[in-house]
Amino acid sequence: MKLPGGLLVDGQLRCDFSFKPITGSIEREIIERNETTDSLATTLVTALVTQVTNILNITLASVAGMVANKELISSLCSGDRQYLILQLEAIINPASKWLTIECHACDELIQLQLIPGTLPVKPAGQYFPITTTQLSIGEVSLRAPNGADEEALLQQPDNEKQRLSHLLKRLILQSNKSVDIEQLSTDDLDIIDQTLEEMMPQPSINISTACPYCDSLQEITLDIYEWMNEKNNDIENDIHLLAINYHWSEKEILALPKIRRKHYLQLIEQASHLAFEERI
Ligand SMILES: [Zn+2]
């Protein structure tokens, strides 16, 4: 698998990455880390950006030929970070899921089937992650926003205009110096918007579908982070069942990837059905 964007390393765009084997201990670490992030974060949005960095830091083995760490993960562009979260979901929860939405025209309930990890991804543009463009103030360099930009942005006061100008200051340089954002015209802002749009890779998290009852078009924005916050004690139950049936230690059980853990649980369930049928 390749990142849709990637990182510039010594002038070369590197798109390779690898996850660690996702064992029960890693799943448990994700759950535990989420609980601590929840209590420390000041707002929900800052929590999400930090949570994505933390989860990727727990699960990624390498990025762009380097051992993954928080700094490297924060330097990935936003589209790459979303892509990795989607791929991770596909590893941890591979089963297809159903999404129920209410038609905005006829109020009927519509069901959509989603298979984790299969959303189409718009690839990065030719000049990703940094390009030059001509604005009214002259030629500038323009860089695709990354996780560190998102984090810095959220530490700014909750004012849309201030946040935008803070972001642009980070992304635009003229002769290696930051530019005065106030000097930019509306046309300049349009050019910046368009250039970034073309440059940035993006998983399609907006899907549209026609209602099967009234044919009206539905636009849905998927919450790709939802699975990270699903609170369930699945792991604790799994450990319990495997420990009493196979007499394995907690450590041994947590070393199994989820797919194997679930396979053993299936075998236990089949065996108990057989035992039940024999009795009747
Ligand atoms: Zn409808």
Image: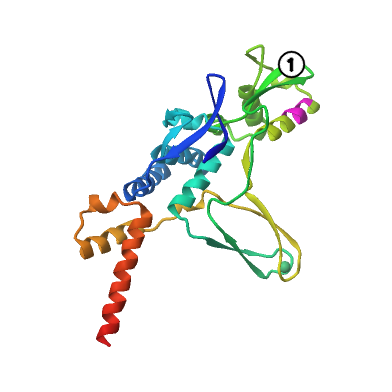
- Identify the residue at horizontal 79%, vertical 24% (top origin): 185
Q: Is residue 175 above or below residue 205?
A: above
Q: Mark 1 points at which residue?
A: 139
**Which is the main secondary structure of the residues drawn in magenta?**
helix
User: In the rendered structure, which segment of residues is drawn in magenta?
Assistant: 188-192
Q: Where in the figure is residue 29, as x and y percent of width and height?
A: 35, 45
72 displayed left or right of 107:
left
Q: In this view, does 258 lie above or below 179?
A: below
Mark 1 residue element? strand
Which residue reaches farthest top?
175
Which residue reaches farthest bottom?
280
- Identify the residue at horizontal 47%, vertical 56% (top origin): 94
Q: In which quarter of the image is ligand 1?
A: bottom right
Quarter of the rendering containing residue 266: bottom left
Q: Where in the figure is residue 78, as x and y percent of width and height?
A: 57, 36
The image's colouring method is rainbow
Q: In which quarter of the image is the C terminus?
A: bottom left
Disc 1 packing (10 Å; few <14; some 14–19; many ≥20): few
Ligand 1 closer than 8 Å to label 1 CB: no
Closer-to-camera residue (23/74): 23
274 displayed left or right of 161:
left
Q: Does the magenta stretch include residue 189?
A: yes
Q: Does the magenta stretch include residue 20?
A: no
Quarter of the rendering containing residue 60: top left
